[in-house]
Image (tube, rainbow, N blue to C red):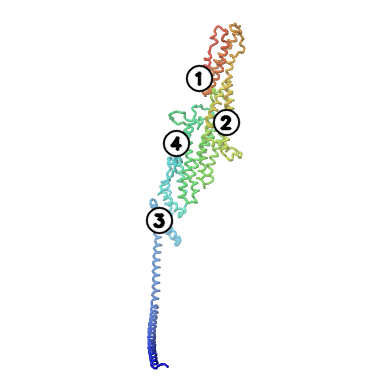
Amino acid sequence: MIPTEDASARKREIEEKLKQEQETLSFIRESLEKSDQLTKGMVSILSSFESRLMQLENSIIPVHKQTENLQRLQENVDKTLSCMDHVISYYHVAKDTDKIIREGPAGRLEEYLSCIAKIQKAVEYFQDNNPDSPELNTVKARFEKGKELLEAEFRSLLMRYSKPVPPILILDAIGGDEDMEVQEDVMLEHLPEAVLQDIICISAWLVEYGRNQDFMNVYFQVRSSQLDRSIKGLKEHFRKNSATSAIHSPAVQAKRKETPTKKTPKRPGFDHDLRGVKHLSDDKHGAATGKDDVLDIEIDSYIHCISAFVKLAQSEYALLTEIIPEHHQKKTFDSLIQEALDNLMLEGDNIVSAARRAIMRHDYSAVLTIFPILRHLKQTKPDFDITLQGTAASTKNKLPALITSMETTGAKALEEFADSIKNDPDKEYNMPKDGTVHELTSNAILFLQQLLDFQETAGAMLASQESSSSASSYSSEFSRKLLSTYIYKVLGNLQLNLSNKAKVYEDPALRAIFLHNNYNYILKSLEKSELIQLVAVTHKKVESSYSELIELEIQNYQRSWLKVTEHLTERNIPAFQPGTKLKDKERQIIKDKFKGFNDGLEELCKIQKGWAVPDKEQRDAIRHAQKRVVSEAYKAFLLRCENISFTKNPEKYHRYTPEQVEVMIDKLFDTSA
């Protein structure tokens, strides 16, 4: 059992807890009631706020919409006013731009183009919106006027600032100064930079907006004239400075090195003193230029003009690409170069025609004017082809046609020259009285020597006339063989003609001297130049052949002395003992031998003293050999007759000592003796 006190205490504890719980529950109830009241108050407030918001919205939204409409109307009004201003401005364009358009674009191109742009927009507006308005015609007329003035300014700038390139600049550009070790690439400025930019600007506008190609015609006409004038100016520069240029001209200097000191007279078939071969004599002062030097200047001038054309044309094309639209550049360039190119080709044709006329007159040396030109044309042809890319076929073919014409003419001249050497008439009055070198020989050798400077060109000339398949390759080896064969042919024709000419001489000895002199001259000339190596390409024994011919003619000459030395032989001399008295017949035989020797010696020395052997070495050798033969025979004869008494006046027959005979022979071939 639980004690009573404990139970009472337990009961009080429970009652206290219950009382606390009841109080807590009462508090919660009160709190809930207050919360419900607050909730009802908030709901009431929110409901009232919502009601007021709805009322506000119903009031504001119409006002907002009205405001938006008013703003839109304002914007439309502003846009309309702006458009009106813009449209009205088109009606004032003609008036606003009138002064600038009338005064033209000179000096204010940018401002002028801006005005043109305004006019163009006005034209577009009226065409789109009011095509029947009179204002359209006004702005159209103003636009056309502005375009005309731009075209006029284009022409004016081109004509005012386009000047011929000075000859000195052209020579620098093409490397005319051959003394310079390194040639600098000289840039040619055809137009001032500021002017060029204006021209480019006008060109671009005319292409894009002007829709007119007339300015391209203006361009090529003006620039074509300047190109032609530049080349003519270079030609005139050569003409004016011909005296000085003749002294310093590479062509003249190169040829003077080949100039022989011996001057040959004129003859039919070699008019104009072998033009291009013979030049001024070796005058120390070089006082004046000869006509051949003047011709050399003309050749140099043409060669430089060809190079100048290529350089100037390249420069013109570079300028043209900045100004002319790309799809019109080749055609415009083709038109631009025609006048200068045609003039050069015409001059080349004139050179060919002059050579042809000279060939018809049998002046074959005139073909030598073609060689340096033809060589230069061939060297320049690759640059020509590159420069003329894109031009018409007729333009591209002009240079090849000129080259072909020159090759054909040159080849014909070479062949006819060879035939003329063979067929040169044997005229007695034209033969050298002293048996010296015939001018046909000297002229022929000079002509062949001149070919040495143009071996490749001359070989190509001959090859161009060959129809064989091997000729089609035009190899340098093939051309060299043809030239070698040609030179050998000329030498053969010359030898044949000389043999025929020699028959004009009645004296066999003079005939031999003549042939000896000519053969020796040919051989020495071949040896002194490269002709011997060139001939040896196809005929290796030509040197020995001429040596044999020379030796043969020396032997033929020596036979002339047999009529002298035959009197010194022991034939018919009677046998006798010293002191034996000779019979009259025997004495007469010895007298006749002395007389025959003396008369023959005097006659030959007198005749042959007037003959010529120009080569000192050969002259001395012939004299020495003849002295030895005659002197030995004479000494032996004198020794044989030493103790023979055949006359009371021995000095009458024994006129010369062996030494005197040698002195007389030493005076052979010496007209001054």
Quadrant of the rendered structure where residue 587 is?
Answer: top right
Left or right: 125 in relation to 505: left
User: What residue would you read off at disc 2?
Assistant: 490
What is the C-alpha distance between the residues marked 4 and 1? 46 Å
What is the C-alpha distance between the residues marked 2 and 1? 33 Å
Name the residue type under label 3: Ser
User: What residue would you read off at disc 3?
Assistant: 114
> Which mark is nearer the camera, 2 or 4?
2
Q: Position of residue 464 (x, y in %)?
A: 57, 38
Q: Secondary structure at mark 1?
A: loop
Mark 1 Cα-neighbour bin, 10 Å: few <14, some 14–19, many ≥20: few
Left or right: 57 in relation to 355: left
Q: Give the mark nearest the N terminus, 4 or 1.
A: 4
User: What residue would you read off at disc 1?
Assistant: 671
What is the C-alpha distance between the residues marked 3 and 2? 78 Å
User: What residue would you read off at disc 4?
Assistant: 239
Residue 148 visible somewhere in the drawing? no
Q: Give the mark nearest the N terminus, 4 or 3.
A: 3
Mark 4 Cα-neighbour bin, 10 Å: few <14, some 14–19, many ≥20: some
Name the residue type under label 4: Arg
